[in-house]
Image (tube, rainbow, N blue to C red):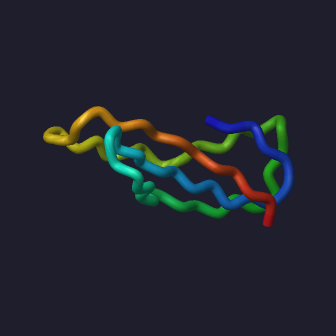
Amino acid sequence: MLKLEGNFKVSVYREVNGENKREIISEQNFEKCQFSEPVKILPINLLQNERLAEYTADCKLI
């Protein structure tokens, strides 16, 4: 869950170790967010046969 205020676009990325690529796995827009009401991002689908990966999220004001 995230506590945001305003309008945001949240992007979740997968970065696989040993590779220099970043893959967007989820993007969501949230409007009229308030700190008093946390927002939930969609669950991330993990790949079973994937090497160790790192997941990051960016929040951008829109």
Q: In this view, does 2 lie to the left or right of 55?
A: right
Quadrant location of the N terminus in the rendered image: top right
Number of disc labels: 0
Q: Image point 40% across, 56% down: which residue? A: 21
Q: Image point 53% across, 61% down: which residue? A: 27
The one nearer the camera, 54 or 18, is 18
**Residue at the limit of the structure toward the bottom, as seen here:** 62
Q: Image point 58% across, 61% down: which residue? A: 28
The x and y percentages for residue 43 are: 42, 44
The x and y percentages for residue 18 are: 32, 41
The x and y percentages for residue 41 are: 55, 47
Q: In which quarter of the image is residue 11?
A: bottom right
Q: In this view, does 50 lie to the left or right of 18?
A: left
The x and y percentages for residue 37 are: 76, 39
Q: In which quarter of the image is residue 34?
A: top right
The one nearer the camera, 53 or 21, is 21
**Residue at the limit of the structure toward the left, as seen here:** 49
Q: Quadrant of residue 35?
A: top right
Quadrant location of the C terminus in the rendered image: bottom right
Q: In this view, does 21 lie to the left or right of 51?
A: right
Q: In this view, does 51 lie to the left or right of 6?
A: left
